[in-house]
Image: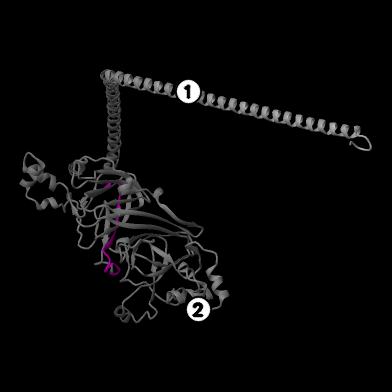
Amino acid sequence: MAKEKVLFALAVVFLCVWSVLGHHEVLVRKEERRVVSVCESGSISAVDVRDWTGGTNYHLQFITMEPNSLFLPVLLHADMVFYVHSGKARINYMEVESSDSKNKKKESSDGSRSIDLKRGDVYRLEQGTTFYITSYPAPTRVKFRIYAIFNIANVEDPQEQFFGAYSNISDLVRGFDERILQTGFGVSEELVQSIKWAERTPPIVPYVLRNESDKRSWKEGIIESVVGFPDQTAELNKKKKSKTRTFNFYSGKPDVKNCYGWSTAITHEELEALESIDIGAFMVNLTTGSMMGPHWNPKATEISIVTRGQGMVQIICPTNPEGQFTRHVKCQNSLYRVKEGDVFIVPKYHPMTQISFNNDSFVFVGFSTNARNNYPQFLAGERSVLKEIDREILKEAFSAPNSTVVEELLSSQRDAIILGCTSCAEDLMEKAAEEEHQRAEKERRREEKRREEEERRREEQKEEEERARREEKEEEARRREEERPRREEKEEEARRREEQKEETRRREEEEAKRREEEQARREEEARREEEEEEEEEARRREEEEEKARRREEEEEEGEQWIRKKKEARPLGGWK
């Protein structure tokens, strides 16, 4: 009991004050995975995570296959490292190899290989590899599950857009024009159309392993022409698992094992397939009431997946042990409970610990980036790095009363790496709840204070606005008072201008009236003159007519006198 208390005190000393960090930064819950595909034969889900200390992105996929299923052939866009969580299957693949490597591997003239996979295996496939997976039948219907990480950072051109972890071979074929396929494969148009426009299938389909004597179909001949190697399903029973190119967590001897659990980590030194990729894998199995001692990775970021049970994970901000935000530090201490299927990320330099509950074990498998030459540094236990530091220095560092306290701190724990820690997870969870309550209460008080401050600012702003309005009104009144003489002068000037305009308008109207009257007078005179001329003309005409009439009367009288005269002359005439 005393040892447990000392251990718990040690954890408290080195893990300091924690606070909950948004789980989108370092934790992805199982239910938050993105569904890629779901069908009767299996499912695929995915998670994208980021090592924000190095700015590297990683893509994880969780592939589940029913017994007697086929994961259709794909072309890898990035390096892939995977762990087999359950079930058995066979993977067939063809790697992109140099001429030297091909010459060394005479046993595989077509470049294809097959490996039997079982629970606990770790394997790696290179970028550019074409592969497919066939799951074996299982009497107990155990599903084949793998957890895979794709090293997006290892894509040759990082400036190019990442188009996914892999492409289906069938889609690569169907993407070409019918004429190109017909010419390229030397087949009929009908056959090309039957493949190009065939119904799309899900990435995992039902499939039963065939015997070697089975004949290949014409569709498989198309795939062979595209991929460049013959049908590999016929080779499933010919090849055996290569012991040098795979690793099984459950077969080998753990790196660390005691009554509290075991741990195994592999890098390129243990697995040949990891030679050219800077990614490692690890598995930790904590029994009930155990803890992976506080430690950090100086070079690697860990991406872990909980495969069984549940536990508590605590991560410490390396630059700020108090867990407080500063102007230049964005990280903070974090503590959270994880369960089966959850993914949690621990960046490099971040001290961490994983703890199991008293009633359940805690098993997680993971991948470590930049695994080459990374050696975890433990704070507690027999392999504590603090033991390499002078006790007096540590006394000063911890502000201890004497070096005896430091010596007891470092020598009390005889176990290393995986330590017993009964009820630690429960205590941390309880403390987390209490701290969460305090944090929520503190946040509530801060929110209340913020609202009060905001209300006060609104009142002040309202008063300031009211004062500003009053001052504006007073200033406006003052300006109006100052402007009144000028305004009256302007108004007087405007009045005078208006009077002048009125006088001008009146004169113009009188002048117009005078002109109109003069015009009327002239017109009247002209009319009278015209009437007088007409009367004079009428008078002249009457006089002329009268003269003419008198002349006619006179002429008529003369003619009458002459006629009378002639009538009165005797027949013999006048003598």
Which is nearer the eye, 287 or 355? 355
Q: Residue at x 49, y 23 (%)?
A: 513
**Residue 259 at what x, y percent from top left?**
26, 52
Q: Residues within 10 Å of mark 2 (few under 14, many from 20)?
A: few
Q: Is residue 273 magenta?
A: yes
Quadrant where the C terminus is found in the figure: top right
Q: Is residue 458 magenta?
A: no
Q: Secondary structure at mark 1?
A: helix
Look at mark 2 in the image and give the residue it sits on: 183
* Residue 187 visible: yes
Q: Amino acid at mark 1?
A: Arg
**Residue 11 at what x, y percent from top left?**
20, 44
Q: Is residue 201 above or below residue 343?
A: below
336 displayed left or right of 402: right
Residue sitting farthest toward the right: 571
The magenta-colored residue range is 272-290
Dot 2 or dot 1: first in sequence order is 2
Q: Secondary structure at mark 2?
A: helix
Q: Residue at x 17, y 42 (%)?
A: 13
Which is nearer the eye, 412 or 180? 180
Q: Amino acid at mark 2?
A: Thr
Look at mark 1 in the image and give the residue it sits on: 514
23 displayed left or right of 524: left
In space, the residues marked 2 and 1 are separated at their CA atoms by: 108 Å
* Residue 120 visible: no
**Residue 183 at what x, y percent from top left?**
50, 78
**Residue 516 at what x, y percent from top left?**
51, 25
Picture quadrant where residue 574 is located? top right
Q: Are marks 2 and 1 in contact (CB under 8 Å)?
A: no
Q: Is residue 284 above or below residue 91?
A: above
Number of marks in the rendered image: 2
